[in-house]
């Protein structure tokens, strides 16, 4: 006959491990996304559309602030179910933003390798639109996390 107690203990231990990994994963995703934003801003500083969009969104400051906020979360706070759920959805928003930033980066990289660049423009508006949408969602989820942390 098997006992249910070891299964419960393992299950509870597994939740803590999963949350620690999730916190590290969120931090890594935040950091990688912030680095990609910086790379785009430096490498394409002459692109008015990118510059205007990133400035309008204040994307760099928001990402760095969000990264610092999540990094400062203590173990007690990380164990709250509401925080876990909020972080999970925040991670999804960051991942989506990162994917669209990466697509933009690839488009600009491919454009730089094309012949007759002076006669063409990179097609980046769809990417910028998706980045704006993803960033608005990310901002909403950061606000939700802040409200949860205040309770």
Image (cartoon, grey):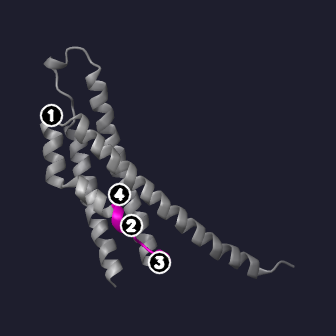
Q: Nearer the viewer, residue 3 or 91?
A: 91
The span from disc 1 to disc 2 (Cα, nearest Å) is: 32 Å
Disc 2 secondary structure class: helix
Residue receiving disc 1: 46
| Tag 3 and tag 4, C-beta contact below 8 Å | no
Identify the magenta region. 67-79
Which residue occupies the foreground of this view, 145 or 32?
32
At 83% from the left and 77% from the top, the residue drawn is 2
Q: Residue at x 15, y 34 (%)?
A: 46
How far apart, in angstroms, are the residues tagged by discs 3 and 2? 15 Å
Residue at 29% x, 38% y is: 104
Q: CA distance from mark 2 to mark 4?
A: 14 Å
Residue 103 appears at what percent x and percent y? 33, 38
Question: Regarding mark 1 in the picture, which secondary structure is present there?
Answer: loop
Please give the residue where the numbered disc 4 appears in the rendered image: 93
What residue is shown with label 2? 70
- Nearer the observer: mark 3 or 1; the answer is 1
Q: Give the residue pinned by disc 3.
A: 81
The residue located at (31%, 25%) in the rendering is 110
Check disc 3 and report its element: helix, strand or loop: helix
**What distance separates the C-alpha of mark 4 from that of mark 1?**
28 Å
For marks 3 and 1, the one nearer the N-term is 1
Name the side, left or right, on which 51 lies relative to 26.
left
Mark 4–mark 1 CB contact (< 8 Å): no
């Amino acid at each position: 006959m098997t006992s249910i107690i070891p299964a419960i203990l393992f299950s509870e231990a597994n939740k803590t491990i999963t949350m620690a990994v999730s916190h590290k994963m969120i931090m890594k995703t935040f950091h990688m996304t912030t680095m990609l934003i910086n790379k785009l801003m430096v490498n394409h500083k002459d692109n008015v559309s990118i510059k205007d969009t990133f400035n309008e969104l204040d994307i760099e400051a928001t990402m760095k602030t969000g990264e610092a906020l999540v990094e400062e979360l203590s173990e007690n706070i990380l164990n709250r179910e509401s925080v876990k759920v909020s972080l999970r959805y925040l991670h999804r928003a960051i991942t989506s933003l990162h994917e669209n930033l990466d697509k933009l980066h690839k488009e600009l990289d491919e454009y730089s390798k094309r012949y007759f660049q002076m006669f063409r423009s990179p097609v980046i508006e769809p990417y910028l639109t998706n980045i704006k949408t993803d960033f608005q969602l990310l901002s909403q989820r950061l606000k939700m996390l802040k409200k949860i942390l205040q309770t």
